[in-house]
């Protein structure tokens, strides 16, 4: 059976980079934005709309495009439909070849397959620094503006996770490994992490 690893992460903690490097080193499939595209392909919903739901930018009503027509849909029904499509796709991918899954409640969705569940976190200083390093060219947010953005993203992730899992987001009891990336270069952590993953190999 191929190994399944799920990664939950605080915004700016380097979880996405860690997941990608870990997948590449271990020769595993990596699933992040690929999940969003897969949901859009399977559901017929616009890619931008699916992204807005899965990335938790939730609004009361949202115009979406299906084919050439525009439709305005009610939020609760559509969010639930997107989450269902997301769950089915994640399960299909995990069954097919395992892999590293970033966010999107994958730890809960795949709980029956007993994935290695990792939580990535860091102190605010380190998160601010990572966000600055990855900021788009020309972006000029102050530290306070970026701090508020970080907090807002984490709140959205927490609400989304708790809504669909009934579990509290980020609680250590829900993970097999919690990693503090404060002041650490992600690439330097990978060799030791790969060794640790062997504990969980079937």
Image (cartoon, helix red, strand yellow):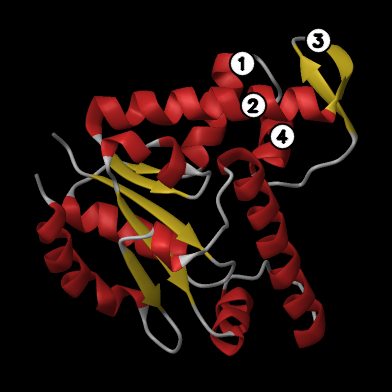
- The numbered mark, 3 or 4, whose residue comes first in the sequence reads 4
Badge 2: residue crowd in 10 Å (few <14, some 14–19, many ≥20)? many
Q: CA distance from mark 3 to mark 2?
A: 20 Å
Is residue 77 placed above or below 166 in the rendered structure? above
Image mark for residue 83: none
- The numbered mark, 1 or 2, whose residue comes first in the sequence reads 1
Q: CA distance from mark 4 to mark 1?
A: 13 Å
Q: CA distance from mark 1 to mark 3?
A: 15 Å
Which residue matches tag 3? 68
Give me the residue at 56% from left, 34% from top. 36
Image mark for residue 82: 2
Q: Position of residue 193 (x, y in %)?
A: 21, 69
The answer to which quarter of the image holds residue 50 is: top right
Please report contact status of discs 1 and 2: CB closer than 8 Å, yes or no.
Answer: yes
Which residue matches tag 4? 48
In-front residue for pair 171/42 = 171
């Amino acid at each position: 059976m191929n190994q399944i690893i799920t990664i939950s992460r605080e915004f700016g903690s380097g979880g996405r980079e860690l997941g990608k490097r870990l997948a590449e080193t271990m020769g595993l499939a990596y699933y992040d934005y690929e999940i969003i595209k897969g949901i859009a392909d399977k559901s017929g919903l616009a890619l931008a709309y699916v992204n807005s739901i899965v990335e938790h930018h939730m609004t009361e009503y949202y115009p979406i495009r299906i084919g050439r027509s525009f439709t305005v849909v009610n939020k609760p029904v559509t969010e639930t439909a997107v989450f269902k499509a997301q769950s089915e796709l994640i399960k299909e991918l995990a069954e097919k070849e395992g892999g590293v899954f970033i966010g999107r409640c994958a730890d809960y969705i795949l709980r029956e397959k007993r994935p290695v569940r990792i939580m990535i976190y860091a102190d605010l200083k380190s998160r601010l620094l990572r966000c600055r390093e990855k900021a788009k060219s020309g972006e000029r947010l102050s530290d306070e503006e970026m701090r508020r953005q970080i907090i807002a993203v984490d709140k959205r992730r927490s609400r989304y996770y708790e809504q669909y899992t009934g579990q509290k987001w980020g609680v250590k009891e829900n993970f097999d490994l919690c990693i503090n990336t404060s002041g650490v270069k992600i690439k330097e952590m990978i060799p030791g992490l790969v060794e640790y993953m062997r504990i969980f190999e079937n």
